[in-house]
Image (spheres, coloured by chain):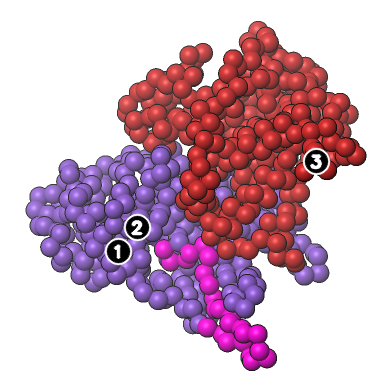
Chain colours: A red, B purple
Amino acid sequence: MSQLDTLKSAIKDRLGELECVIGWEQGYDPLHATPLFIRTEADLDRLIIGPLAVHNLATYLTAYKGKKIGVVVKGCDSRSVIELLNENLISRDDLVIFGLCCDGVVSQRKIRAALPADPGFVEAVDISANGLKITVAGQTAMLNMTDILADKCRTCQHPNALISDVLIGENRQSASSTSLACQEEFEAKSDAEKFAFWQETMSRCIRCYACRNACPMCVCRDYCIATSRDPLWVSQDNSPAENFMFQMIHVSHLAGRCTECGECERACPVDIPLMLLRRFMNKQVQDVFEHQAGTDLEQTPPLLTFKVEEERINERGW
Amino acid sequence: MEKFITTTNLTRLAEELAANHRVLAPVATGCTVTFRRFQPGMTLDLHSRMAAVSAKAGTFPQTETLFLVKRDTTEKKPELIETLPQGKNVVIGGRPCDARGKLMFDPVYGTEKIKDLYFLQRRENTIFITLACDRPETTCFCHSVGSGPADPTGSDILLTLVGDGYVARAMTPAGEDILKLSLFTEAGDKGKEADAKNAKAREMMGQPHDYSSAPATILARFDDMDFWQAQAAKCISCGACTYMCPTCYCFNITDDDLGLNSQRIRTWDNCMSHTFTLEGSGHNPRSTKAHRLKNRVGHKFSYYPDLHQGVMACCGCGRCIKQCPVGIDIRQIVKAAQEYSE
């Protein structure tokens, strides 16, 4: 049985006891998937998995508190589920996890850059193990999967769901590389260059909060300080400075919690490379607390606890 | 009036206009195209793709300063400084859906009783030099909401790509004035080519969807929260759809207290957000995302057309579909209401 058929069969076995199971289906064109909320066996027929199933469905979980639901997760998505459990934000008893062994997902941005015409003109997509054969505006291009893989997949250390009730597929190998050229290039810049980069990039930000709302760990939802009026913490002025302020709040509120699923960057309608900030912060957390969010059900996120003396913070040494 | 302008001269036109206008034009950063304040030396990108965000900011900027307040350290009364928009603007390289958006603002911000001077001044002082589309994207449906890929409504000049330049057609006296500049030459036979291209683009869009039953059928679902919960299940309540939209005109007003210099600003608001209808008492009449999605779809395809002679508050640009992080398709939601049966 194919991975998809095994998954369908596993979901069918549990569907009766669940409010719904969240997976993916074909979206508005052949190049896009969209989340699917499976309630009946007829819905199940529409389920798809594969390189277009980019969305981290863990972002929906906190909204179903008190209801028993199922969710399909890739390796990276499973880290968000673990982090939500670590923080006691969801209950394991209310969740049936269908874990996937994942071959990676595409970056729509890389596809856009690689195609001879805008992907909005897509006519057909043929998905194979090697890549995507895409016809746009009458021209067909073969894009190799290695060239269009999302950045997170290029360095993925957890391609197999780390937590699941049912694990579907054969275990995949972790990526051999853990570093990304784009990150290294960015971090090698001087402070002045970085500042100029963010000034320019944040002038594109429209503060739509897609980055925030796609984030599975942004659990404040309707009560985010970015939109509070009293007190007015962040101005609604969409100047680069205020936009950057919001992004700084977002990134620091994820310290020790970000599972690097990349949803913030994927969701951004104006392509702001937000993962540059996330990856940098996560590296600091790793250095100071030896902590990688969402990788261990037993761990406590470092900012949800304290030690009188932190091993790697020399508090009185200076 | 019909003229021709080469691609090179269009850039020169943008540069010349930038001398005494605030010019907004599509500019690429990598493979991301957005409307930017155009300055000489920048490269126009009219063709690689449609700009991610609509050209709404041309007449309705995301942040508008309503007035400034200046104080000093004495007991003197604070001074209010008017900041009505000054100067002239040009939007170059928007699409027909971009140019049309502001028309949906008119019956709201320019009524007999209520005049929004900030919007109206920009509306009056903004020239739209629009590019006709030559091919529809999978998310385009302008032909289903009373428009089309070469619809000149709302534009001062309509450009159609022919060979190494554009056939330019003036739609207004302001457009004619620009076409009199020496950068333009006679169009000659190119006009016919432009007509053929426009017709082909329209043909490629296929049959329009009939939305005429949408106002009544959406209203019929008003109390059916099961319907809206199913439609909204995947919504993540961000504002990408509304901020992309050429016709979404809602705003917020906040005071930025900057010490001795303060300002009252209005900024784009977003009906998908919880705070949009949060009342002072703490009560929220649209407490869930299902209520909010119902409002967005209902406003565009039911309440607005009911109030304004059947005109949908939608240009069919499809940005809300393709920029939605989870791929919500407003066409499918309206269709579901239209085709609903018990």
- Tag 1 subunit: B
Rendered-image quadrant of the N terminus of chain B: bottom left
Tag on residue A317?
3
Q: Is residue B332 visible?
A: no
The residue under label 1 is: B18
The residue under label 2 is: B38
Residue A223 in the image: x percent, y percent? 75, 54
Amino acid, disc 2: Phe
Give the residues in magenta: B58-81
- As displayed, is residue B141 above or below residue A88? below
Q: Does residue A6 appear to the left or right of A316 in the view shown?
A: left
Amino acid, disc 1: Ala
Circles 1 and 2, Cβ within 8 Å, touching? The answer is yes
The foreground one among B48 and B204 is: B48
Mark 1 element type: helix
- As displayed, is residue A132 above or below residue B78? above
Residue B315 in the image: x percent, y percent? 44, 55
Which residue sits furthest bottom? B76
- Tag 3 subunit: A
Q: Residue at x 83, y 32 (%)?
A: A311
- Tag 2 subunit: B
Mark 3 element type: loop
